[in-house]
Amino acid sequence: MKIQNINDSIIFSAPYILRVSKSVIYNGAVLISGDKIKDTGTLSDIRTKYPNAAWRDFPSSIIMPGLVNAHVHLEYSALGPVDGRVDFVEWLKDLIQRQRTFDEEHISSSIDSAINQLINSGITSVGEVAKSGASLAPLLKSGLNGTYYNEVVAVDNVERTMSRVELEGFYNGRKSSLDGSRLIPGLFPHSLYTLSEDVLREIASFVDSERIPCGIHVAETQYEEDFIRNASGPLAELMSGLGLKTLRKKRKWKSVIEHVDAVGLLTPMTHLVHLTQLDPMSFPLLAGRGVGIVLCPRSNYYLKCGAFPFSQSLEYGLRVGLGSDSLASNASFDMFKEMRLLYDSIHAPSLSKARVAEVSRRLLYMVTMGGADILGLADDIGSLTAGKKADIAVVKVGKGVFSDSFSPEEHLVSHATADDVIFTMINGAVKYDIT
């Protein structure tokens, strides 16, 4: 099913409509017109207002905005899914060696499979970090919305320089391929340990002046701190063992966050990915600068990186989204399980019902509007709001679960999985339907 033109309308109804931007609608409906959301309300009101619209009901279900996976590397899909927990450096060593063994056909087919898994999991928008560009054509074909980040990395020579002219050429080369598409371009300097300070400053200046979405891996592991501050530790040893040029001098910064700030990347245009080693004392600085944060809880778990201090972060009004990272470091693209890992880290019998509800709403915001904000797409996606793109996911709830005390938000966070998704629509086109 695809809505053919702007005058074609259909009503989707369910016991619960999770709008995110506003309160839940019980026995509600969403009116889709063309590729946009036109209205939301109770089913009786919507059918009265739009008597000529087609109607489809989803019993025992929750209709919600399409999920936003704010950090993924589809190019590494052939290297996954991850098989159990492994030390970060051992995983990285294996990844570097294994990625040299796959041909283009295998990489392409794995990307296609990964995109199908994204859509079938209720994900309608992504933050794709791409080095080779192999994921570009499949993503454009898929219809997914999102931001396509050009990854900047120089592990062969981390002290190399990059002029503004080089940087502009690097960015514009792929930007032209995205013109008129559902993807917007961005830049992604890989990390503090794979690029020189001069290159990082040049990138920071460029993205700030041109208002380009930007991201960077930060504080993913303690090994990163050792590498940056002392030019030593397992990361340095790995690169040296692989014959790669590494940082030869100690850095003067007291912390990774201080380093990010010093090179000019602690801005609202940038998001920091991971932050498992973050000192909670940095929260006021991050909040004050308006910098974005993307958490990848299950990837961090599988790579034994530690965990972001989620509980302490809730009081600071931080801009946070959720990502899965690549299948090379995760078992799936299940964003419900990403939420649940954070939920379980804070949920306890002693928490009040109001606090549980607050945390559940916050996590659902992170995986919808929070991710949309990080990707620079908050005006178009992330909530069931009139005028936004018709991106929706329908999640089946078991019969008999509904009761007077049933909370759709808490259910989605504490019980749902990607296997419960039965319907995904992107820009008014049905991409997945098993009802």
Image: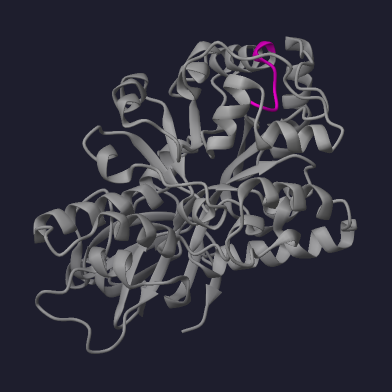
Residue lying at 50% horizontally and 24% vertically, measured from the top left: 256
Foreground residue among 85 and 188: 85
Foreground residue among 206 and 229: 229
Q: Is residue 140 among the parts visible in the rendering?
A: no
Give x and y (percent) for residue 296: 49, 49
How was the colour assigned to the protein in this rendering? Answer: one colour
What secondary structure is the magenta-colored segment mainly? loop
Residue 235 located left or right of residue 161: left
Which image quadrant: the N terminus?
Answer: bottom right
Residue lying at 42% horizontally and 47% vertically, measured from the top left: 307
Give x and y (percent) for residue 169: 78, 20
Q: Is residue 269 above or below residue 238?
A: above
Give x and y (percent) for residue 135: 74, 50
Give x and y (percent) for residue 66: 44, 58
Q: Is residue 240 among the parts visible in the rendering?
A: yes
Residue lying at 77% horizontally and 27% vertically, measured from the top left: 154
Which image quadrant for residue 77? bottom right
